[in-house]
Image (cartoon, rainbow, N blue to C red):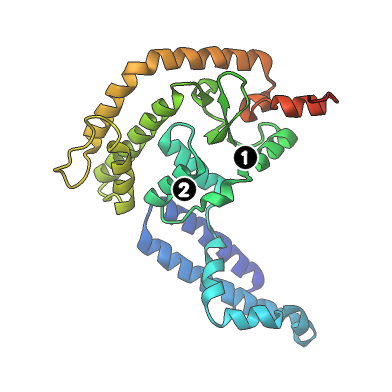
Amino acid sequence: MAASLEELEQRLSHLRTELRGAVRARDKAETARIRRALREAEAAWEQALETEAGPDGEALLTEPPAPQASATTGAPRRKERPTHGSIPIREQVHQALTLLGAPASPKLISSTYEAFFTESLVATKLASLRRDEERSFTAQGYARPYYICAALTHDRLVPARGLLALSTWPVERRIIGPLSPRADFLTHAVGTAEQIQRLTTAGHPAPDAAWRLLRRFALTIPGAYDAAAPEPEPVRVIAAAHAEAAVHQQEDDQQRQAAAQRARAQLADVQQLFGAAPMRDALRDAGGTLS
């Protein structure tokens, strides 16, 4: 007996939950199996819907000629397939930033996610993400467990250009002072090396892309890379990054802490996450004039 629409919809929901777990576990074989099952369930759902609609509903279920013709080639179907059960882009960014441990650019976030996870993350899609997150926070407050927010400049407390951060981080970690870009770079290197260590310990060899990412970090950290070795050693990268970070850590921490204190005293919650309005915007909102 054919499954009902309700049963098929429950199966689709269950499969999407399983797919998310398989993707997070980086189990490629299981991910492929679940995707096949999803496609079969979706086809069965379409057939059941057509049967339920009957002859009178045929026109409603028929796709326009152009999309239907292109679907027979297979290319559009491959483009659309990842949207079924795929991880939301904000969650992808959250996972990458959690791994990196410090504010990062969309390009680095994308490279990191693609190095360690099975799905791609297109950096250009992050352009409007922070604005969407700010609108959501303004409307709902702390309704979500986390938000993708801004890093803040240490002097004006405005959004640091081209950097994303997590709302769950303390303000100090999201402040960008004169020494912070290098300090955060070293934090990124440590986070990448530690993730490779975790994978290795768990018996899951790190992908080649992850090693290439670690090599990019190691090449610019004194003592982190042995040119004679086929791959950088995570332990060595971590030690070298910590050694360099210690040189400027005290001064960088002081600058961040001072800026964070000003942010907490002067800014509302939404501004602490997404930055104060630049002076030009503030004057315009206040009805002022610019010379």
Residue 122: mark: none
Residue 110: mark: 2
Looking at the image, residue 184 sits to the left or right of residue 88; the answer is left
Of mark 2 and mark 1, the one earlier in the sequence is: 2
Above or below, 178 against 203 in this view is above
Residue drawn at point x = 62 percent, y = 17 percent: 263
Mark count: 2
Looking at the image, residue 152 sits to the left or right of residue 192; the answer is right
Above or below, 166 against 268 in this view is below
Q: Position of residue 13 (x, y in %)?
A: 57, 60
Write down the residue under mark 1.
Answer: 130
Q: Position of residue 241 (x, y in %)?
A: 30, 28
Can residue 1 be seen by looking at this rendering?
no
Q: Position of residue 149 (x, y in %)?
A: 59, 34
Q: Position of residue 148 (x, y in %)?
A: 58, 37
Residue drawn at point x = 56 percent, y = 73 percent: 76
Q: Quadrant of residue 146?
A: top right
Q: Amino acid at mark 1?
A: Arg
Q: How far apart, in angstroms, are the residues tagged by discs 2 and 1?
A: 15 Å
- Give the quadrant of the C terminus: top right
- Residue closest to the eye, 17 or 82: 82
SS for callout 2: helix
Above or below, 54 against 263 in this view is below
Can residue 209 be seen by looking at this rendering?
yes
Residue drawn at point x = 56 percent, y = 67 percent: 80
Q: Amino acid at mark 2?
A: Ser
